[in-house]
Structure formats: structure tokens, C-alpha cells
Image (cartoon, coloured by chain):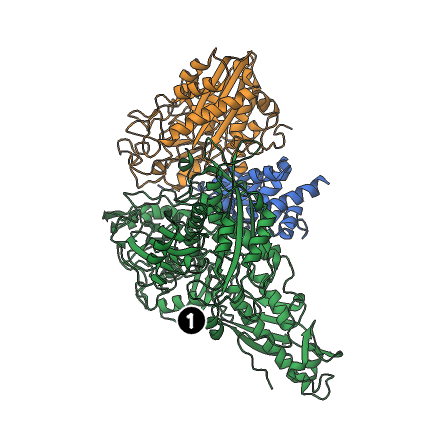
Chain colours: A blue, B orange, C green
Amino acid sequence: MTKTTIPVHLDINGHHHELQLEPRVTLLDALRERLGLTGTKKGCDHGQCGACTVHIDGERVLACLTLAAQAEGRAITTIEGLAREGELHPVQAAFLEQDAFQCGYCTSGQIMSAVACIREGHAGSDEEIREYMAGNLCRCGAYPHIVAAVRQAAQEFAA
Amino acid sequence: MRDFDYIRPASIPDAIAAAAEPGSAYLAGGTNLLDLMKGGVTSPQRIVDISRLPELNRIERLEDGGLRIGALVRNADLAHDAAFAKAYPMVAEALLSGASAQLRNAATVGGNLLQRTRCSYFYDTASACNKRVSGAGCAALGGENRLHAVLGWSDACIATHPSDFCVPLVALDAVVEIEGKQGRRHVTLAEFHLLPGETPQRENALEPGDLIVAVRLPAEAASFAANARYLKVRERTSYAFALVSAAAALVVDGGKIRAARLALGGVAAKPWRARAAEAMLLGADANEATFASAADAALADASPSGDNAFKIELARRIVVRALTSAQAGTPERLPALPASPFSNIPGARHDA
Amino acid sequence: MTLELGLNQQPAHLRQGSSIGQPLTRRDGFLKVTGAARYAADNHPPGMLYAVLAVSSIARGRVASLDIEAAKAHKGVVEVMTPRNRPALAMDPDAKDHPFMFRLDLLQNDEVRYPNQSIAVVIAETLEAATEGAVLLSPRYEELPARVGLDDAESFVPRGVGVGNPAVQHKGDVEAGLKSARTRIEATYETPAQYHNAMEPHAIVAAWDGDRLSIDTPSQGLAMAQGRIAGLFGIAPQNIHIRSPFLGGGFGSKGMISGPQVLGVLAARLVGRPVKLVLRREQMYGPVGHRAPTRQTLRMGMDGQGRLTAIDHHAKTASSTFDDFFEPAADASHTLYASPAIATSHEAVRLDTGTPLFMRAPGEATGSIALESAIDEAAHACGMDPLEFRLRNYAEVEPMTGKPFSSKALRECYSQAAKAFGWASRPLQPRLMRDADGFLTGWGVGTATFPALMFQAEARAVLRADGSGLMETGAQDMGQGAWTAFAQIAADGLGLDIDQVDFRAGSSDLPNAGIAGGSGHTATAGMAIHNAGAAVVAKLADLATENKASPLFGAGNEGVVARGGRLYRRDDENRSESYAEILTRAGLTEVEGRGKGAPDPASQETYAKHAHGAVFAEVKVDPDFGQIRVTRMVGAFAAGRVINPRLVRSQYYGGMIWGVSFALHEEAVTDRRSGRIQNANLAEYHVPVNADVPSVEALLVHEDDPHINALGIKGVGEIGVTGTAGAVANAVWHATGVRPRRFPIRIEDLLA
């Protein structure tokens, strides 16, 4: 049984992309394999690790459990769209300064999650940061430094 | 993942017509369905994407004092709705104890009711599972089953329902509003999920094409706001399914229990309303002895389905703790670790 | 003249400390926080196809049929590779020319020897088509009963354990020691199978051009991978170019090239186009190694003063049915505690699993949690504080060999960490501490240790007439910070500011940097870099000191010191000359030097070489539910010279969090009938999440080691796991009075 492809219009980091996709293509695979936006990582492909965290309409979601078609017409932000004109986003800068990563593979997802975590108002205490960042696994064990980076960036935003 | 036809209906009737075809599935948040499709556990030929249907993402107060929650309201939006969290704090706490912030931003109210079990044999398509293939057998029986059901299970299936949200909902007499080919009908959440019996493949009261459009909470549900708690024992501090959980809500007056609600999660194929325990609580003194008796009543019919006898004792204890916490009063601020036994450290108000 | 440099000799004219020791941020950090760091699966050469593995769902038997037609009929599927059409190899994948050549499953036949073994590869125009094509193969099997548990097969004594250590060793008379003891303990501990689960699944992008091969794949050992692939395909190693600039974690699972990676190369060969193959998460539970389960029994005897009279440590473990790797768990008892009699022994069974391999602190982690638990039990049996007991049995020389330690600042680790933790106020008896909220609170200690290993590495250094320098070595950064730490060593070695150094690594066309493993990469490749720097500076010094026009003329090679891009006369620092001036006058655009890193055989004979540490942990346990949370950890570690404290602290944290995971979370749950792992995912194979990790402190204890190598470097990558796992287990005992004997500690074990 041959199914047809469908046109999907994606708005990513302020750029418009017209794609012709099989409906089964996830947003994650569309980003990585069709659009060359490989900063968003695939760690588990089942919504269990957080490495593929992106923003849709400003909110953090998992690109592996989102069909590209579901994201049609919505504003998608990936790690590539976070820095403005070469200036690191404060969360990116804080991750760098606090050594909040080691291998770096979960980092895009951690940072996208952290930006949203702060925006949601869930970075009020270390304990709250730990809970609201719990959806992003880090096998290297950078958690203490991730908490420090989120705390630092949150304080910068509050200042 | 098998390829499929993708349909984005413009209205509820269009959606129902499209989904009535065999092999169809509704797609809302996708957090469970896409996972199952990737694993080959389910392979719909047609996906009916209802995520943009108008009218299903509203939270409405009803004239009778009840609340109507649209099926597409996202878990995070509901939990962070200040009025909702104030009136139904244990529901908000349950929502926030489930999954992760990212998943809660996608998962919907309707989808949460339809979550499939986390039984590993259900996911493992090389194993026998009566849910996946009726009559195939149950590999979980005699397998790795320390996380499986202790209430309401049968020799055909010992899986549990994984939802946190549904546990306080069933305690509060939530009603599921369903639209189908024959029009709209209401089914209590207690009757919505089915125990496995001989037909574990049949998990709920939905007929082909049926669409959950809303979940309703009756007016009385808000009367427990001051004394309600959801607690969840997990094997990680967060981002883990419940080993056992409990939702407890009380109305206490002069030391006497005037109304009581109790439900358990992680113990059965459905969110488990403990009515016998509620009956015992009603009119009794609100104290530890009463709570212990209620816990015994709640688990009176429990039996291990495998290496999980400990879950019965654990469930007893969590019932006592949840009731004790409820009696002590709903926390003024939502804990930083929602529903965790380690939730003593207060966090920011979720409704601020 | 050119200075003759011994491998580990301290060259007189290099000055460390300009860059070494500085807490620089990661040089690869900008790329990583912007998503621009290119990992293997991020590559997409023109014309690339996608390959997806079909894997076995049985543990043992043979593949009876595959529906190749159905897979090929799926739109987009280009080819299906099976044993029938897999391109020929120059070498049998089951050949084992040396102990570290591990057998690979490369579709050599239809036999299945573990679940998740590759049985076919589907190659398609899209990832979706390849994935679905693999499903459509609908394999059918002839299945044989699986052997799953440590009691499911006949046990034997392996010929060697770990990297070839004897399976059975002893010194003194353990039975006599036990007999003479005032107090004795005996306990058995079980540890489960664990899977590395690096966040980055194994991935490869392979492209053939004739008999030349271009590969992007994560590798902890580029030269080994290159050699292995060259052997399999019968081509020259230099025809293979492997790029591995960033590994998304390795932990041992990317040390040896794995079967699925080679299948990606074979798939590219078959279709004549570049191919990308990425393991699905569930496929990582089998073909890429794991930590084998163990059952360990420890017997200890103590005299009236709490001194050990004997340690007997026996470990039962498992390897696969077709290859040999035996977790050397009992060897953990060789190095930590003084005892007149020590016996260690191993036995093993063969199970229908993938071959276990090195996983962060192999042997040390499994052995440590059992040993540290048993030591705690022994202390309790003697009525002693567990820290005092450890100090009473402090090993002044390596217990098993009697060799002196090259350095050992463990006493300082104990005292600094104990002080920071507040250990002194700990009650001796368990279940006595409750916090304000009623949680049972417990404190535990564990001793950390890991051998300070060195392997073989080479580096090439260049100084240029523009005043800049280049350092090249095929080092691998799997998150430990190689890009940064090696650049720091290079800067000091070249006598340059770090910004003047072009450091190249992560590619197989660079000098062989050896393996990033065994906590030995920084020491080994670091010494190669250091020596290459010394060699090129020596050449430069020759140019200057032999030329009358130079202010350094006549100073002699050792009479100058390099710093900040200039050579200075040691006896008169007012006389100096820049590198650029020296090279320009000599009419050279650059000079080159090469260096090696390797262990010094003489000091290997003389000294026992280990890093040490002490970890203190606090846990809280819900008294009714048994749910555990680690709330506080303090570790202090002495591992020689610290190249970059910012990175080293991250390594210690990571190791300590692995220790928490070992004690409380990780376990592969296998169905006893099918042999399939039931939690082959990241939802139910629990690794700690952020909320599981409390405040962590890692103290860097100063330690000078004049014997280990010229830089004084030990290693920091694995030691954090050891000690911590035991400290957490011991804290759980102290909180609850229940002694954990199987790991991870389960809630039901604490429901008293």
C-alpha cells in the first residue's frame, strides 16, 4: 500500500520551509535529515531522554514525539535559533561558564529546556530547577553544573 | 513506523466520520500514540489529527458549579491554571508528577485517559500479550512482574494503568463526555476504564469513532480543596511512572470525616477507586487508626500477580500517608517535587 | 645537538603552569552550546542512504526466514543485506588474533547468539523506509532455550579476568587468617547487568571511494578502530580515514569498533553509496557491550583491634557464549586495605547475551560496591566507626604486592572530605538519625581507587615562523575535555600562550593518541604532547644557541627556558629571543618535533600506581515507603596533577553520579524465559535524572607524584564511580538498619 506525501510548511527559527513529506516523518527527523538542522539530537526517539527538546510557539516539547505535520505553521525554535547575531543566549553562556555539559550530546535539549524552564517561572530554587529539568537526561552526570547554569541565567533574567 | 493517511478534520463530526473507518486512530498530543507506533505495538492506517479542532481546548465553569475541561487542554495548561489548581489541588499535583515538562506541554486531557499500559510485555511485540493480540496469552504472568497489578487483574492480563491524572479524577467522580456516531453521551470515569477479565484488549468504554470531547468534574469535587493530596512512590525522584500512588481527599468537621475520597494508582488496569475504604472513613474520627483501617479495606481484595506482593503493603502505607496528608491540609504552596514523598521542601507557587 | 628525552623525563627547559592548572572553559564549548558541534550522525554526504538494523528477538537459535521481498517492496527500500549477499570480508569476524580482538556479528551466518543481534540491514532512501523495511522482514526463528541467569549454566574458572589478570590470586593464608580472627563477617552481594547508554547512540556514516574508506563514527580508540576495519576489509589502515571529533559519551562502549558500525561500512560497500547507520536506543542493549552481572562473596577476619587478618573476595560473573570478557570484580580487594592474607578468585558462566565489555570502572565499580559494603559490615562487627576502621586498615604499601605507592594522599582525602561533610557527629548505630520531616537519615563512607594507567601515544608538534604553534594527536574527546586539557598541555609544552596553539585531534590521520579509556588518556596522550613540545623546543633552542647572532648563543640547550613564545637564558632572563626571530634568521618557516607517551617500565616495576579518594554520602529514606534520595555527597580525590580543575570537577561529579546510579537505579531486567531485556529503553532502565542528584562537592586534594610521569598526571575519569556506590549503600544501611546485599537497592528490600 503506497501512501502519498503531503505538503508541510514549517516555520523554523524565523525561516520558512516548504517540504513534501510522508505523514510519518517526525519533526525531529525533518529537522535533522531533511533540513540539515542537526543541533537537535536524537537520544532515544521515544520521549524518554529530552535530547530533542525544541520550542513550538515558545513552549518546550519533544521533537521525536511530534509529527512534522503537527507542527505545520507553528513557530519552531531550535538550538540553532537561540543565539542572536553571534551573541550567545544567556542560558548558552551560563552553560559554557558553569561547565554544564561534558560530551555535549544532551546539551542542545538541556539548553532549550532550560530557556523554557526559566520562562515558565520554574527556576525559583535549586530544587525546583532539578524537578523541572528532570525530563532531560545527562549520562555524563553534569546535573550539578546544569542547575548552577540555570540558576545563574535565571538570576540574570530577573536582574 | 508504518506509513498512514493523515487527515486533519475541520470539525468534530468530520473527525468522527473519519475515525469510524477501521484502522483509524485519533492523534492529539501524540506522546503515547507515536511511541507505540514506533515500537510497532499499534499500526494505524489512518491518523485523524484532532489537535486543531476548535472548542476542545477550553476550561469552562458550568452553571451547576461543576467544571468542564476540553479534551485537548494540555496537561501543563490545566495544572498551571490558577483557578483549577486552587479548586482541585490534588489533580494539579498529579498532573505535575507525571512525565516531564516537555511531555506535559504536548499531552492532552483526553489522551491521558487513553494512555496504554507500560507493561513491558505489551511493548515487546515478540512476547505474548492478550491486549495486543486477543487470545495470545499473557507473558507477564510468570515473567518480570514486580511492577504489575495487585487489584482487579485476571489470568488474561496483569497490566496496570499508568496515569497519574486519572487517579484523583476518579476519586472526584469525574465524568467523561464522549461524542460518537450516535451523538453525545456521558460515562463516569470509574466506568470508563475496564478491568481485563477475559477481554483485556478492551480497555475502555469507547466504540469505534468515539471521541472524548471533555472531562467534567461535578460541583462537589471542589469541596475537597482544603484537604486533598496526591502522593506517588517512584524508583527515581522524578520522570518515572508510579510504583504505587494514591489520591486522598477529605472534608473534616470537628474531627469527624464528613466526606472522603480515595483512589489508588499503579495497582490495577484502571485508576482504582477505593469505595469500601471511603465508606469506612465516612463519619469516623479522622485519626491514624481510622486511616489504617481504611487502608486495610482498600487493599482487602488485593493479591499478588507475581513478584509484587510488596506493592500491597506499599499501597496500604501510601493510603495512610495520603489520608494523613489530606487531613493535615492541602499544602499552601505546591511542592517543588510534586507528589513526591520528598516534597517537604516548598517550591514556587505553581499558580502564581 | 638534540636533547635525548626519556619518555617520562622532565625536560629542563619547559615550564608548566602557564596553562596547565588553569580552570579554562571548554575550547569546544561554543560549538556544543550552539548545536554546531558535529557528531557522527550529523553528517550527510551527497547521495547518502539510510541503513537500519533488523535485530534478533530471540536469545539463541537461528534465523529460519526473512521476508526480504516484503521489505524490498516497501517504497524507498533499496537493498536488504543478509548473510546471502553481504560483501565478502578478508577476515572471519569470529577470528580472535589477540585477547582484545572481540568477535563481531557481521551477518557471517544465520546463527543467533543473543537478543538484539544484527540479523539483516535494510538500506533505503529515507530513514522512515529503512526503519519500516526492517520491520517488514518479519523474521522467523528456530529457537533454543536461553541461558539467562548466573545459575543457568555450568561455571568455570576463566583463564584471565579483565585485561588478562589471573582469575585466582592470593597472598598469605586466608583460612588461617580467618581462623585466628576475633571477629568475622561473610556476606554475598549481587550486582546486575548494566548498559552504558551513552546519550549518543552508536552511529556511522561510511563512504567508499574505490578501496579508500571515509568514516564518521564515535570512537574512543581511532587507531584501533582503523586497524580492526583494515583487517576485516583487507585494506591498508592508511586507506581508512575516521573522524571522531566529538563522542556523545562513550564510557567504554565505543572503545572497540562494534558490529553495527562495521555493518554500516558493509552496507555502503554493498550499495556503492554513502550510508548512515544509527542504532536505535533499544538496539544498544546487546551488540555494544555491557557491564556483566556479578555475585560476590566476601569473607573478612579482624583481630581485637579491628585490624584485618584476612580478606577473601570471590566473584561469579558471566560472559557471552562466544567470547571472553570477565568482569574482574574481586581484584578490587588487591589495593585498598592492608591485610596479611588476601585471596581473590573468579568463576564465570556463559550466557546468551552480547559480550560484556569495559564499562566505566570495569571490575573496580562492581568490586568496590561489594568491598566497601563488606568493610562497612566488618567495621560494624568490630563496633568501630567505618572511617576509623578504614584508617586502621590503611595500606601503607600495596597490600597484594607489597610495592610502595608512587604517591598516595588518601589520608588527606579522608580528612578533608570528612571535615567538609561533618562526619564527626555521626552516631555509630544505624536508624538513629531523623530529619525535621521524619525521614530516616544515614551517612556512609566509601574509599575510591583506580589504577593510574598509561598506554601508548604519539604527538607531533610544530613551531612556526609567525610565532604560532601546532600540536597534533588523534586524541578522542568523549566529554572528559580532551580538546581543552590537551591544548593546555600543548601550550605549556610549546612555551606558548594557549591562544597561539592550533590543537588538532579526533581524526585517524593524526598521530596515534592511543585509547581514551582506563582513565589513562590524559596521562598518555598528555605525555606525548608534552614530549613533542619538548622536542620541537629543543630544536629551536639548538638553532638559537648554536648561532652567534643569537643573544642565546652558547647558553646550551638546557640553559634556556621557553615561555610566552620566547626562549630565555636561564642564568640571565634579560637575554631572550622570540621563536619568530629564531626561525626567521634560520630561514625556516617551521620546525617539527615528535613525542611519545608510554608508561616507564622501571617505575612500573618499582611502584604501585593508583589514584585515591574518599566519598561521603547522606541519604534520606522515607520510613514507610523505602523511597531513597541521596541528599548530599562530598568526595575528595587525589589523582596527581590537575590539568584543568573545572573539567576535573565535572569528571568527579559524573563518576559520583554513576555511583549513585549503581547503588540505586541501574539494572537491566531480563525475562528469564526469553532472555530478552524487558527495559531496553530510557524510561524503565533508570539512570539518575536531575532531581535524583543533590548537592555534590568534589575536593581536589593536592598530590605530587614524581614517579608516575613527568607531568605527574594520574587519571580522573572512573575513580568517582568507585567509593561512591558503596558510600550510598552504606548510608542506606545507616539510615535504615537494613544492609543492602543486592543492587540496585529496591524499595521492597527496605519495607520492613
Left or right of A122: which side holds B161? Answer: left
Position of C512 relative to A75 (above/below): below
> Which residue is under mark 1?
C237
Q: Quadrant of residue B335?
A: top right
Q: Residue furthest right?
A: C574
Q: Position of residue A66 (x, y in %)?
A: 49, 39
Quadrant the C terminus of chain C occupies: top left
Res A42 visible: no
Left or right of A151: which side holds C247? Answer: left
Position of C177 relative to C233 (above/below): above
Q: Position of residue B47 (x, y in %)?
A: 43, 34
Q: Nearer the viewer, residue B337 or C679?
A: B337
How crowded is the residue under tag 1: few (<14 C-alpha within 10 Å), some, or many (20+)?
many
Position of C128 relative to B190 (above/below): below
Q: Position of residue C617 (x, y in %)?
A: 53, 45
Q: Quadrant of residue B136?
A: top left
Q: Nearer the viewer, residue B304 or C136?
A: B304
Using the image, name the chain to which the residue with label 1 belongs. C
Q: Position of residue C89 (x, y in %)?
A: 32, 66
Left or right of C137: which side holds B93? Answer: right
Res C417 visible: yes
The amino acid sitting under disc 1 is Pro
Query: Circle 1 sits in a helix, a strand or a loop, which is it?
Result: helix
Quadrant the N terminus of chain C occupies: bottom right
